[in-house]
Image: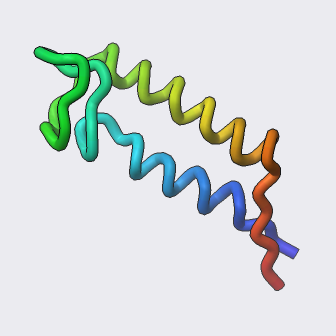
Amino acid sequence: MADWGPVIIATVLFVLLTPGLLFQLPAKGRVVEFANMQTSSASIFVHSVIFFGLVTIFLIAIGIHIPTG
């Protein structure tokens, strides 16, 4: 039996938290900018920390599993 929970959660969060796609935190001129498609090193770091925290919460603390087969 394969567990597709981690794959789906990580893929969805990666798409949603790509800096500049939906939002960018911190932005170059303001705290948050939406859909600007530009990024900075600080923004990449902040989005990576948010991604790691959410993946940890969803996969370890809550334990989301999507079994197949």
Across and down, in percent, residue 14 comes to 46, 47
> Residue at the location (16% across, 32% down)?
38
The one nearer the camera, 48 or 62, is: 62
Q: Quadrant of residue 28?
A: top left
Across and down, in percent, residue 48 comes to 48, 28
> Residue at the location (25% across, 45% down)?
21
In the displayed structure, would residue 47 be above or below residue 40?
Answer: below
Q: Residue furthest bottom?
A: 69
Across and down, in percent, residue 58 comes to 70, 46
The one nearer the camera, 28 or 41, is: 28
In the displayed structure, would residue 32 be above or below residue 67?
Answer: above
Left or right: residue 32 versus residue 42 is left
Q: How many marks?
A: 0
In the displayed structure, would residue 33 be above or below residue 22?
Answer: above
> Residue at the location (51% across, 29% down)?
50
> Residue at the location (76% across, 57% down)?
64
The one nearer the camera, 7 or 13, is: 13
Left or right: residue 46 versus residue 55 is left
Q: Quadrant of the C terminus?
A: bottom right
Q: Quadrant of the N terminus?
A: bottom right
Identify the image's colour scheme: rainbow, by chain, secondary structure or one colour. Answer: rainbow
Left or right: residue 6 versus residue 3 is left
Across and down, in percent, residue 46 comes to 43, 21
Q: Residue furthest right?
A: 1
Left or right: residue 64 versus residue 22 is right
